[in-house]
Amino acid sequence: MKFILNAIYQIQELALLTWRVVRGLFRPPLYGREILMQMDVLGVGSLTIILLTGFFTGGVLALNSANTLQKFGVQSVTGELVATSLIRELGPVLTCLMLAGRVGSGIAAELGSMLVSEQIDAMRALGTDPIKKLVTPRIIALVTMAPTLTVICDLVGTMGGMLVSTTMLHQPSSTYLASAKRAVDYNEIIGGLIKPTVFGFIIAIIGCYSGLSTRGGTVGVGRSTTRSVVVSSILIIAVDFLLSKMIISVLLES
Amino acid sequence: MSGNHYAIEFQGVSLAFDGNVILNRVSFGVRYGEAKIVMGGSGTGKSTLLRLTLGLIKPDEGRILIDGEDITDYSEEKMMEVRGKVGMVFQEGALFDSLSVYDNVAYRLRETRVAESEIGSIVMRMLRFVDLEDAAGKMPNELSGGMRRRVGIARALVGNPKIILYDEPTAGLDPITARTICELVLKLRDLEEVSSIFVTHRLQDIDVLSREYVMRDDRGDIVFMHEDETLCLLNTQFIMLREGNVIFNGTDEELRASGDPYIRKFLA
């Protein structure tokens, strides 16, 4: 019973935080400088791990699928398989799981440390709304940067797949690219962008909420950090299922 | 002031967390220009008083008035305006780690969109007041505990608030640094007529704040004076908290003469 009540309480608090963020968007001040800084720190700062993740995922997809495709004599569609898998599923999910690990944990740790060292109270005492100053910029940054990084991941992944196909599977690059091009249409791209936008929001709001609800000093900061990664990763995977179902029925089947 | 005698007033304020009573019908007032020293053991609700005063938490019952204005039911947005009148010095300074000393002190000015050309002179004046002009470019992690508290004081002074709340600003400091902090409090009390609540459980602070005062001599220099037989300081009063109740409210002379066993033990 206590667990259920606690879960309801957490959901209520999360909804309240989201509402305060949304309401704050329409009231000045909007911390533009802070938003740009967070886009740089959270987005540009994650570029390296996203490039590596995308490249190797594309490569391994090509490697694994080529054997099976060869059995059916359709090795020429490797590009299509790699690009579709990346755009629909692996690009958004892997990018955002990496972001949850790198950025979500960082947000929870930073805000949690600020809370236990009374910096959040000091901010309020100095007349600043911490939601507007700390939470909103992080949410805007991740909602914009997660899709951007996903596109980069998709592109680099497709290139990684091409490198494996041409060098290890001895497939002409033109065949791979022509096949990959067939996979890309507007609906696929829109579907592939909706997911990271939602996931970016999940990572930011869970990270901020975990940090701002830290209890119990520095040990609590550790707990908040772990909780933020675990909850946002599980939510990403669960929401991915629901979004996939919706995207397939609305965009791809029509 | 319009007939109101108090800069800060608590009227029957109660607060409980998870069934534990933190404050029980606490009533007191801080007159304009007065320093109210709040004492009591750990966990008696001293810091909670300050958080309530700033509206960082809301009481379960009772009213809180700042400068005659009842802030009890104010929304967070409305409280932001009231907080402009109040400065708070946090226990460990609570400086923003990512900002330099200069930027920490300039924080409130930048938030209120003061021109950058004005900010420089105000920040340096505040840092000069706490004798930390040379530390302007340093980051908080390069400062000692005492320096952090002094930067905290400088930051709280920006905007010239007439009410300042000190949350154990001398805790864990060596006697010389603690004395420096108390001298700053005296200067603000006697020269700037700042009303304040000073939370502490150090007897040395009590001695300095209740027996010394500051004035300017003929040349305009600041001099520290001791209260003697002919003079009794009235602008410093004491409150003793015990388990959320106010068990004493009065002057240092009355405090020292109290027969209450808890107070006797506290002052021993």
Image (spheres, coloured by chain):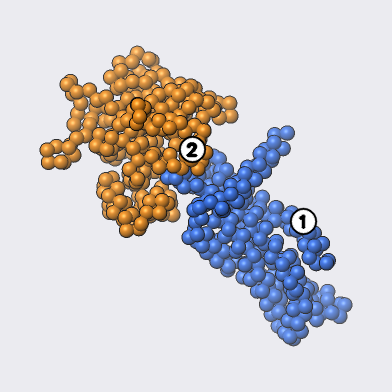
Which residue is identified by label 1? Answer: A242
Could you tell me which secondary element the residue under label 1 belongs to? helix
Q: Observer-nearest residue: B6 or B58?
A: B6
Q: Could you say where residue A182 lies in the image, as x and y percent from the top left? A: 77, 78
Q: Nearer the viewer, mark 2 or mark 1?
A: 2
Q: Could you say where residue B219 lies in the image, as x and y percent from the top left? A: 12, 41
Question: Is residue A225 something one can see in this rendering?
Answer: no
Q: In the displayed image of the protein, which residue is found farthest to the left?
A: B218
Q: In the displayed image of the protein, which residue is found farthest to the top?
A: B259
Could you tell me which residue is drawn at 69 percent across and 36 percent down?
A: A5
Q: Quadrant of the C terminus of chain A?
A: bottom right
Q: Could you say where residue B47 lies in the image, as x and y percent from the top left? A: 44, 33
Q: Amino acid at mark 2?
A: Leu
Disc 1: host chain: A
Which residue is identified by label 2? Answer: B56
Could you tell me which residue is drawn at 58 percent across and 47 percent down?
A: A20
Could you tell me which residue is drawn at 76 percent across and 84 percent down?
A: A175
Q: CA distance from mark 2 to mark 1?
A: 40 Å
Q: Tell me the shade of chain A.
A: blue
Q: Observer-nearest residue: A171 or B214?
A: B214
